[in-house]
Amino acid sequence: MKYIFTLLLLALTFQSIFSEQESISQEEAKEKHIKKAKVLNYLFKVNERSLRKLQDTSGPEETSEPTLPPSEPYVFTPDDKPESGNAAAQNHEVPVKKPVASKTRTNNKKAKIQISKFHSFKASDSGIGPFTFGMLFYFIDRPIVRYIILRLRIHYWSRLRNLEESAESVRSDCSLTKTELSGKTAKDGINVNFNCTANSTKNVNNANVTLNTDVPMTLVNEDGSSEPLSFDDVNFNGNAATESASIQKNTKEIDPNFEEAYLKDTTFDWSGTILVLKGTLDTNTPALTRRLTVQAGDKFTMYWDDNEYPDCELKQESPYHTLNCETSSKPLSTTVQGIHLTSGANNAGNKILNIKMQNGETDTSEINTPTGSGHVYKKSSSGLSGGAIAGIVIACVVVLVAAAIAAIMLRKPSPPVDNTTVVDLKNEAI
């Protein structure tokens, strides 16, 4: 297309040369040359504009957004075997009892991609057609991708006895919310939000939606290239693994433009049944995100041990900050590694707090809510330890018991009752 006008120009030029006739006068030849010059000048301008337009239209093609891989044919496996194949495969009905998410989730805090949370599930009133949900992915020391394709399993429940249950294997396309982060790397790690969409052929409001970890996810880079990633190389933080089993239950909304902060080098202690996490609050996250306003007084809902702990308050104890969480209603049983890299959101869903424990990648020390009264006994002002105080109390109890026994033994017995008089009186009456 670029050379069409140039060829036309050359053709006209040669035509004008060979069509010249010797019989014309000099003035007529001059007039013809002037006309031809005007025509050539016009054609040059048209050609220049056309080339410029072609260059303009070719530019966006080089910088256009990457396209998602097209759907591929669904790969069938035996009914009693898990699914396999490509996450980008076409949607297809599957047996209700076909295994799903049978792959064991590894606890790998060093994974380059980790799943922090599912949120903001929405569907239409009919539940048929597109539905959406959000996911927080934690990328550490690797480029952030533009799209992530997942495989879902939808199990439709039947409200009527005469209708059978059914199941469907569904593709879900997740798009990076902040596209400016695509291709960038956060060496120390960063949470990023993805908006996910999928389609249901029946009422998803009366169904269970599960992330199928048997099928590798597909990562789509900024340049449009794609690669599979097995869930063996993906970590689930907090209670994200539990959330992935029933995605439709995660309706709490999180602002895609949330602010994020980190409680770093964190240690733990107990004050009764209150878990106290102490660390350094870092609000100066990498230049990938905007400056934050997370501060003392903010309250977050944390997700640990498949439980939710609301109203965890951030307090300042200069130069440290502490996150104080009451665990009496839901006793906590986890490890330092289990809390490492977990996230919590405030009620408005626009602030995220991440916990980075000391030696969190490898420390398996237990973190359990104290049993009994839950009180932490401290040394008294006299310097006596708790054991010494307990010994004194026991000794006093022993003395009191001994004294009570002695009092019982030494008590004077009552004189016996003389029944003779009563008998004699009865005899006299007779």
Image (cartoon, helix red, strand yellow):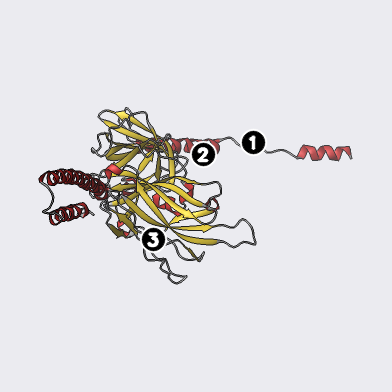
**Secondary structure beneath label 1:** loop
User: In the image, what residue type sits under mark 3?
Assistant: Ser
Residue of label 2: 405
SS state under label 3 = loop
Quick one: label 3 or label 1, which is nearer the N terminus?
3
Q: Which residue is mark 3?
A: 71
The percent position of residue 240, horizontal first and vertical second, equals 39, 49
Q: Quadrant of the C terminus?
A: top right
Q: Position of residue 332 (x, y in %)?
A: 41, 45
- Residue 131 visible in this rendered orientation of the protein: yes
Instruction: Place residue 189 in its image quadrant.
Output: top left
- 406 or 13, which lies in front? 13
Mark 2 → mark 1, Cα distance in angstroms: 18 Å
Residue 240 position (above or below residue 255): below
State yes or no: discs 2 and 3 in contact (Cβ < 8 Å): no
Q: Residues within 10 Å of mark 1 (few under 14, many from 20)?
A: few
Q: Kindly identify which numbered label has been placed on residue 414.
A: 1
Q: Nearer the viewer, mark 2 or mark 1?
A: 2
